[in-house]
Image: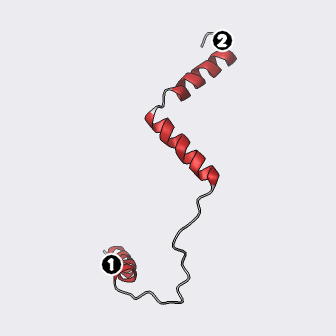
Amino acid sequence: MAASVVSLYYYLMVVKRMFIDDVTESDDTPLAIRIPRLSWILLGGLLIGGVYPQPLPDAVSAASGAILPGA
């Protein structure tokens, strides 16, 4: 119960910061972040692999067949 109260305090501090506190002019937080090209490539690969996953098991099966004939 005590851990719930402590965590509630920290979660409410985030909500307070988002909705209640005023943003000062000296707040230097960037409005946008740059995402590296490698991250975009990996994200695209994950998306394609999630939509069409069959090539990966096929490649593993072909590789294991080349290494272990008869398997």
Q: CA distance from mark 2 to mark 1?
A: 60 Å
At a point 55% along the width and 41% down the height, the residue shown is 45
Amino acid under disc 1: Val
Q: Does 15 sit left or right of 61 as displayed? A: left
- Seen in the picture, residue 12 relative to 33 is either above or below; the reply is below
Across and down, in percent, residue 24 comes to 47, 90
At a point 38% along the width and 81% down the height, the residue shown is 13
Element class at badge 1:
helix
Question: Which quadrant: the C terminus?
Answer: top right
Question: Which quadrant: the N terminus?
Answer: bottom left
Across and down, in percent, residue 65 comes to 63, 16
Question: What residue is disc 1 on?
Answer: 5
Residue 69 badge: 2
Name the mark nearer the viewer: 2 or 1: 2
Nearest to the observer: residue 62 or residue 41 = 41
- Seen in the picture, residue 30 relative to 51 is either above or below; the reply is below
Amino acid under disc 2: Pro
Across and down, in percent, residue 36 comes to 62, 56
At a point 65% along the width and 11% down the height, the residue shown is 69
Nearest to the observer: residue 53 or residue 64 = 53
Q: How is the image coloured?
A: secondary structure
Please identify the quarter of the rendering in which residue 7 is found: bottom left
Nearest to the observer: residue 58 or residue 51 = 51
